[in-house]
Image: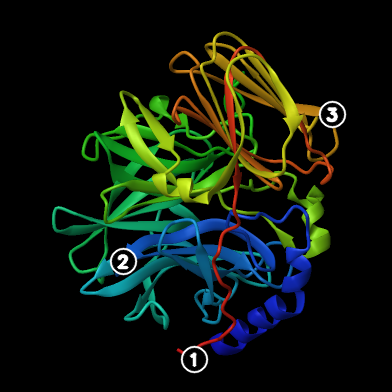
Amino acid sequence: MSELSLKRKAMQKVESLGDTVKKDPYYPSYHIAPPVGLLNDPNGFIQWRGSYHLFYQWMPFRTGHGAKFWAQLTSQNLIDWNFEGPALAPDQWYDRTGCYSGSAVEKDGELILFYTGNVKNDKGERETYQCKVRSQDGVHFEKCGVQIELPEGFTAHFRDPKVWKMDNRWYMVIGAQTNENEGCIVLYESMDLETWIFKRIVASGMGYMWECPDFFRLEEDVLLFSPQGVEENEIDYRNMYQSGYIIGDFDEGFPVERFRELDRGFEFYAPQTMMDEKGRRLLIGWMGMPDGGEEYFPTHDYHWIHQLTLPRELEQRGDIIVQKPPEELLELRRRKIIEEKGGSWEGDLSRNVEIVISDISEALNMNVYDYFFIACEKDKVVVRRPSIEGAGMEWRAAELDSPLEEIRMFIDRSSLEIFINGGETVFSSRMFLDPSATDCRIEGEASVTVWELRKQKGEEKYEVRSD
């Protein structure tokens, strides 16, 4: 099937089921979610010609995985996102079973995308190709074909190119698995975005596969990636797979013993970053988890599944990466509905609010809709919820890097993002409770402020453009 036909078929699915999707009480009001079908990894995050562009992995035809498209969004303010439709469809021999994850850069005024073309034959054997796309207007996308084929020494689990420019050279990191089934990140170099030279393995040594790599500089060099096959270790690595970072050195390496989880919640994976025109390093992640019980999500009944996190601004404080809600999120505030100074609090909250808890004296316990439970001490936080699979309660925890002072929470229908101490510790999770539940309780000495938040105002565009 041609790319144009596939895109039209995808948008027909949006037209036929889009209204049903929006009727789901779990569908978010200000987070990014698919208009229909399945969403996963964020891709191609960039600010280009003044607008933010964000793509994501999209399966429009069902709420399961398969031959992924790239859906496209644009925004002027990081909170109101226009759905521009499918940018890439799996129509070529080198991507016929999926246009997998990748990144975006600008060169000579053009928007350039790199992605992994995924191919599986009738025997289930995988082929992988790193591919390039160009666009002069951010609307029409021209596939340029395969740029890198699988090098020797690696399995076909070789994907998710992230490209950037540094010191007048282009670099690319790719998530990989060696023939010895060890996860790693490999590095390529190019002078012109056309000819790529394999340089080295940048880091390895934990798990059997590393996905969705990213490299950037804050005060030091940072390697971000999502390893698979890391064993649980007390309060660490409790999710099926992890996402985290190593602070190291581009030339001297990234020791895996410095690996630190980026988010301590139940659902967070495959984050991607970019630097905007203000010089901020921004991140967006998938609020989901591969093999993480998604078959039990109730949203299947409404023909959609998964969402992205809110954007986050990254800073380095010593040996940790801090994730702050960017200033643009203040524009979501409609009105202040609660302001309590000191003491415990109990009341009803809708499911589109921001909560700020400050002046915390000692231990603090929160009951969110009799579903999500947060226990805070000065040096540790534990969160609990009913298991998505229905097997009792499950928990996640984090030891704090500094004494507990402030908690900022964003609730959006079926999601909860918790930022502790200005983003030193973050928990991102889904919650599928009774849609009519409103009761919340905070026990402990603290001040509580709550804002009602507005819906995002982005538009959905149904025109399918002929490239």
Among the two numbered marks 1 and 2 on one chain, the one whose residue lies closer to the N terminus: 2
Q: Residue at x 72, y 62 (%)?
A: 304
Label for residue 338? none
- Kind of residue indicated by mark 2: Gly
Q: How crowded is mark 3: few (under 14 residues within 10 Å), some or many (20 or more)?
A: few
Q: Which residue is drawn at 45% across and 41% down?
A: 325
Q: Residue at x 48, y 33 (%)?
A: 206
Mark 2: secondary structure: loop
What sort of colour scheme is used for the picture? rainbow
Contact check, label 2 and label 3, Cβ < 8 Å: no
Q: Where is residue 174 in the image (x, y as percent from the top left)?
A: 40, 53
Contact check, label 3 and label 1, Cβ < 8 Å: no
Q: Position of residue 445 (x, y in %)?
A: 61, 12
Among the two numbered marks 2 and 3 on one chain, the one whose residue lies closer to the N terminus: 2
**Residue 177 visible somewhere in the drawing:** no
Q: How crowded is mark 1: few (under 14 residues within 10 Å), some or many (20 or more)?
A: few
Q: Where is residue 129 in the image (x, y as percent from the top left)?
A: 45, 67
Name which quarter of the figure residue 382 lies in: top right
Q: Residues within 10 Å of mark 2 (few under 14, many from 20)?
A: few
Q: Residue at x 78, y 52 (%)?
A: 295
Establish if 397 lies above or below 465.
above
* Relative to 394, 92 lies left or right: left
Establish if 48 lies above or below 408.
below
Residue, disc 3: 392
- Kind of residue indicated by mark 3: Gly
Quadrant of the frame with the N terminus: bottom right
Among the two numbered marks 3 and 1 on one chain, the one whose residue lies closer to the N terminus: 3
Mark 1: secondary structure: loop
Label for residue 466? 1
- Kind of residue indicated by mark 1: Ser
Residue, disc 2: 50
